[in-house]
Amino acid sequence: AKRVAPGSHVFFSQEMADEVQERVRISNALQQALINDELELYFQPQQQVNDNQPLGVEALLRWHPPGKKPIPPGHFIPIAEETSLICDIGDWVLQQACSRIQRWQSEGHQPGRVSVNISARHFHSANFVSRLALLLQQYPACQHRLTLEVTEGVILDNLQESRTRMAQIKALGVNLSIDDFGTGYSSFAYLRELPVDELKLDRSFIQHIDKRPQDRAIIACLLDLARTLEMSVVAEGVETEPQLATLAELHCPAYQGYLRARPMPEAELLRWLVE
Ligand code: C2E
Ligand code: CA
Ligand code: CA
Ligand code: CA
């Protein structure tokens, strides 16, 4: 056990108790938020690097408690992920995304593919695939328009089961993307045996790509890997013209980032798409 100064454990346990209490409070409020319709999907465009043509959008969750400032997902998703609450939230997100895809299709909007983030517990939950299949029945326009983003951690949690699930998801006409690619500590060997369509290169690699030859070399290498494996690539977190220019030099196909578009509410997205 770690040595602590006499008496300090009292302080630590009080702090820990406060922390637990805060998490319970957020978790309860979030459960209520789901019922009271305080959650909203924002959408961030993804574009082609060479000509800025829109390719699709990533759905990103926002929580607007009444009379308070909106809470970013980094503050509540990790708490929701500790319990099955993340499955309820994830189901809500998927249902919302699918109903949007269906409506946009019928109204003639062309946002391209819609990517949705899926947490590990949700992905591995019982009936995940059959619930997804039901959604696709309810919203048939989603076939070939929906992409699920999972992190390496989600897959490596249980590689055997992930392989089965991913094949079933592909069979539904839903694409699979690896989020935050390259940030884990694993080798890339698992990619050989999984039906992955897309890699999303984490912002941490993109941030200094125009200044650090090391980062540029890593990205060049990952792009090569993706080409060989016939996977598409989206560079995340592009904020500057020099970053985008470097991605163009490296023939990275797609990007998303504050440089061209922040995550935005649906109405704003539909205006953005016609501009
Ligand atoms: P992520 O999936 O890696 O999403 C990308 C995050 O980077 C988003 O933060 C996005 O707003 C932000 N971003 C995009 N472009 C830029 C840029 O140019 N610069 C910088 N600095 N940031 C940029 P956001 O919306 O706060 O989401 C944070 C994380 O919360 C997401 O990371 C994802 O892991 C999680 N998340 C968001 N929505 C959902 C959801 O519906 N379900 C689940 N399970 N997780 C979600
Ligand atoms: Ca993502
Ligand atoms: Ca990401
Ligand atoms: Ca991330």
Image (tube, grey):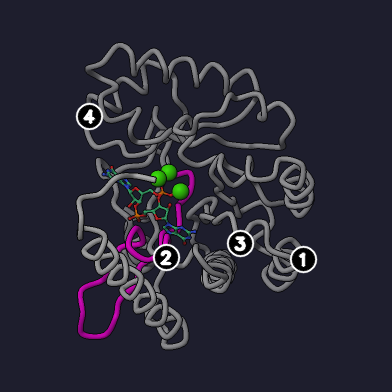
* Quadrant position of the N terminus in the picture: top left
Quadrant assignment for ligand 3: top left
Q: Which residue type does callout 3 highlight? A: His
Judge by depth and name the residue closer to the eye, 261 or 53: 261
Eye-nearest disc, 4 or 3:
3
Can residue 193 be found in the magenta stretch? no
Identify the residue under disc 2: 79
The first of marks 3 and 2 along the sequence is 2
The first of marks 4 and 3 along the sequence is 3
Can residue 63 be found in the magenta stretch? yes
The answer to whether 203 is drawn above or below residue 8 in the figure is above
Q: Position of residue 34 (x, y in %)?
A: 46, 81
Using the numbered discs, state the Cα–Cα distance from disc 4 to disc 2 in whole angstroms: 36 Å
Density class for disc 1 (Cα within 10 Å; few <14, some 14-19, many ≥20) is few
Q: Which mark is residue 122?
A: 3
Eye-nearest disc, 4 or 2:
2
Using the numbered discs, state the Cα–Cα distance from disc 1 to disc 3 in whole angstroms: 13 Å
Using the numbered discs, state the Cα–Cα distance from disc 1 to disc 2 in whole angstroms: 26 Å
Q: Specify the segment rendered in magenta.
A: 54-78
Question: Position of 174 compared to 251: left or right?
Answer: right
Are the residues tagged 1 and 3 within 8 Å (C-beta)? Answer: no
Q: Which residue type does callout 4 highlight? A: Glu
Residue 193 position by quadrant:
top right
| Label 2 residue SS | helix
Using the numbered discs, state the Cα–Cα distance from disc 3 to disc 2 in whole angstroms: 14 Å
Tell me if residue 155 can be seen.
yes
